[in-house]
Image (cartoon, coloured by chain):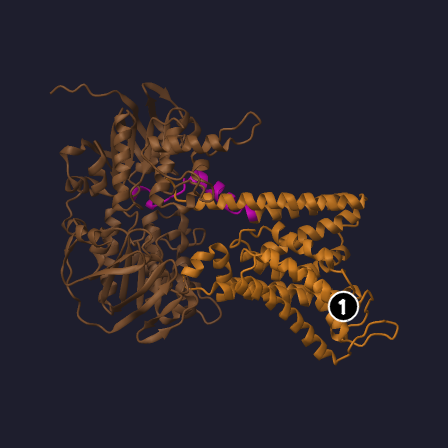
Chain colours: A brown, B orange
Amino acid sequence: MTTLSPPNVLEMSGIGKTFGGVMALRDVDFALRAGEIHGLVGENGAGKSTLMKIIAGVHTEHDGTLRVNGRDVAFRSAADALAAGIGMVHQELSVVPDLTVAENVFLGVQPTTKLGIVDWPLMFREAHEQLARLGIEVNVRATMGSLPLGIQQLIELGRVLFSGAEIIILDEPTSALSPPEIKRLFEILRRLRETGKSIIFISHFLDDVLAICDTITVFRNGRKIATEPAAEIDKRWIIERMIGRGHDDLEESYTGERLLTARPDGPLLLESDALSKLGAFNAVSLGVHAGEVLGIYGFMGSGQLEFARALFGKIVPDGGTIRVAGKTLRARNTAAAKRAGIALVPENRRSMLFALEPVFKNISISILERLSALFLHPAAERRVAQEHVAELHIRPPRVEVPLGTLSGGNQQKVALAKWLAYLPKVLVLCEPTRGMDVGAKDDVVKIVRRLRDAGLAIIVVSTEPETVLALADRIVVMKKGRIVREFSAEAVSKDRLLGAA
Amino acid sequence: MQATDAVEPRPRGRINDWLRGRLRNIAPFATLLFLVVFFCFSSPSFATLDNLGNILTQISVTGIIAVGLTFVILCAEIDLSVASIANTTGVVLAFFTLQDASTNIANKPLPALAAIVLSLAACGALGLVNAFGITRIGIPSFIMTLAMLQIGNGITALLVRGQIAYNVPPFVAALGNGSLGPVPWIVICAALTLLVGHLVLTYTRFGRYVYMVGGNREAAEYSGVNVKRIVGAVMVISAVCSGIAGMLGVAHLGSGQQNEFDNYLLDSISAVVVGGTSLFGGQGSIGNTIVGLFVLGVLNNGLDHISIDSFLKVLIRGLILLAALIINVYAQRLRSTQAAPAGA
C-alpha cells in the first residue's frame, strides 16, 4: 500500500540542548503528523521533557531548527508557542482549586460585559457548552478543587484546546487516573484525533502508551533511539530500547504476573487495630511481620496514603490503636513515631528533602540524636552519608553538593538513604518508584528486598499495581478507606488487583 | 539521566556561580564597607576609636534582641513582640527593685537576685505564651506576636502607670553602664550573646534542626524532627534574649518607662534582614546578623556626624531596608534556581 501520509504539523531537526556543559539532547529529529497521537517514552532524564520544553517555548536557547506547519519558528516564550498553536498539560496541573470550573476554563480571558464586568451567565454557558462538546459533563459552577483529579485534568485539557491549541502535549496524563478515568481520557483523545488535532503523549506507563498512540518514539541518554508505528511493536521491544539491554529480572517484575509466597513467620512488628480517620480511612486492621513486605494497593483517594501518614504520626487518627513490636504507640507527631521505630518516605520527595542543603545533611538528619548528644559531629555525619551514597550508587557520589542539583531518581534514593541510616523497625514507603526510570526502579526493588531480609517490616503503598506486584510478599487492597481484599500465598496479577480495587 | 547525574559547572561560570550563591553574604558586607569608607571621608570625627566605642554601645541592645530574632527568622517565623517583651522585662525588674521615694510606683522591692530571676521568668513566660499560641493553637506567628506586643505593652502600662522608674539592681546597673577597662560591659554582654547564639546555631543539634525546620518544615517533620518543639523553643529563646536586652537596656538608658524600646523592634528586624538572613528561613547566620548590626549602627551613627536633616535619616534607613529586602528576595531566588537540577 502506498500511503499518502498526512502533512507534518511539527518538524524538528538537529535539536541539541546543553545544560551547564552537559548534553541533555543531541541531534534529535522529530516529526509530528496532523491527527496523530505520538507517544514519547524513555527513562527519566532521557531527554523527553527537555524536548517538550523546547517545543512549548520554555527552553528558548538550543541548537537545531523548529518548523510548525512548514514554517521556521523560534519561540522566545511559552506565549509564543501557544500563539503558534502549541499547548501543554503538565503533570502537576496548573488549576486554581478555589475557583469555579468556568473560571478555570476562562482563566485570564473571562468574557466581560460592555461595562467591563465579568459576564458570569455567558461564562458559565460557554464553559458548559465547550466542555460538553468534548464529552465532559460537569457542573461548571462547582469549585475546581471539589472535583476528582481526573476531571480536573480533562478540564485543563479543555482549557488548552479552547485557547486554540492544535498541537497538545500531555505529560504523564494517566499517572493519577483510575482505569475508568483513563478510558474516558482516551475516548476524548481519540475524538480530538478525528478532528485533526495532534497529540504528544509522554508517559512511563507503557501499556497506556501502546493502547492510545499511533506512533511511538523512544529516547535514551538524550538521543532518539527509534520511532515506530505502535501497532508493530510491543512492551518488550520498547523496554529493550529504553534501557539499551535485555533485562530478564525487570521483565519478571513488570509484566505484572507474580506468585506471592508466604515469608517465614517473623515476630509481628506492626499492628493496626481498627484505625480510623474520618473522611480518609475506616477501621483498617492489619499486621506486618519482621522480614515481610506488605503492599497496600488502591486507586488515588482510597485512603491508603492517609493511613500511612497516620502510622507515622503525621495524621492523628480518630480511633483505633497502633502497636509497634507489641507496644501501643500513641504518636501525636512524627518524632514519637520515629522513636518507636516507624519511618516513612512520602510519595513526594520534595516534602522530605532539603533542596538547598548538602546531601550529607539530608541523610544525617534522621540520626542526629545518635551522632550527637549536644554538639554536632560533621565528620561522622559525612562518613555515614558517604557509606550510604556509595551503597545506593547515588550520583554524583559527593556528599557536599546541594541536594537540589541531583536528578530526581537520585534524590529519591537520598530519601531512602535517610532511613537506611536510621534503620527503623517498620518502614513505610509511599509510591517508592513513582516517576523513576526502569534502572532506578530495579535499584529500589533490590534495596527493599535487602531491608526485608535484614528483618524490617516494610509497607509499600502505591496506586500503581506494578509497584506493589514488584515489591510485596502480601498485598491488601484498599477501596474508599477500607481494606476490601487481601492476597497472600497465591498468584496475583495486575488484572486481579485492578479487579479488586 | 546519565548525562545530568554529574552536574559539573563549567569552569568559566564557576566563579560567577560562587559569587551569585553568596550574594546574601557579600551584599551586606559591601554595603558596610561602602558606608564606612563614605563616612570616613565625609566626617573627620567618624573614624576615631571613641566613635567605634559609641557605635558598639549603640548596637548592643539591638544586638542582643537580634540574636533571638535570628533564631526565629531562620525558622521562617517572625517575632514582633521582641521590643515589647524587652520593655516589659525591664520594667518588671525595676518593679521588684527599691525605687526612690519620689518615684510614684507601687513597687515590691525584693533582693536583687530574686528580682533578676523573676524578670527572666517573666520574659520566659511571655515567650512560652507565644510558643503555645503558635504551635498548639496554630496562630500564625505574625499575628500571635502582634497580640503579644499589645499584651506586653499592657503589662508595662499597668506596672508603671505612666511613671518612670530609675533604679535597677546594682549588678544589672553595672552591666548596663559600667566598663571593663575601656570596654563597656554592655558591649561584652552583646558580644557574648552573639557568640553563644553562633555556637548554638552552628555546632549543636538544636541549631541544625533550626536550619532544617526553616529550610523545609514539611521535610523536617517527615524526618522525624519535632517541628513544634523547635518552633516553640525559638520563640522562647527570642523572648529571653529580648528580656535580657530589656534589663540591660533599662540600666543603660537609666530609666524604665512605657514605650522606651519601641525603636528596637524595627532595628532588630532590620539588622537580621539587612545582614542577609533569609526571610524564608533556613539561610543565614549570626555572622550575617553581626554585619547587619554594623550596617545599621554605622548608618545611624554616621548620619549624626555629617550634617543632615534628622528627618531625612528616617527615610534613608527605610530605603536601606528596602534595598536589603530586594537583595534578600533576589538572593533566595538565585539559590533556588541554582539548586534546581539542570534539565532532565
In magenta, the rendered stretch is: B1-24
- Where is residue A9? Give x, y as percent: 30, 23
Q: Is residue A412 above or below residue A384?
A: above
Drawn side of residue A449 relative to residue A377, left or right = left
Drawn side of residue A232 relative to residue B115, left or right = left
Q: Is residue B141 magenta?
A: no
Judging depth in this view, the residue of A174 and A404 nearest the camera is A174
Q: Which residue is mark 1?
A: B158
Name the residue: 76% across, 65% down: B157
Query: What secondary structure is the stretch in magenta mostly built from?
Result: helix
- Where is residue B184? Give x, y as percent: 74, 65
Name the residue: 29% across, 70% down: A271
- Viewport quadrant of the C terminus of chain B: top left
Q: Is residue B23 magenta?
A: yes
Q: Quadrant of residue A473?
A: bottom left
Q: Quadrant of residue B66?
A: bottom right
Residue farthest left in this picture:
A1
Judging depth in this view, the residue of B83 and B286 nearest the camera is B83
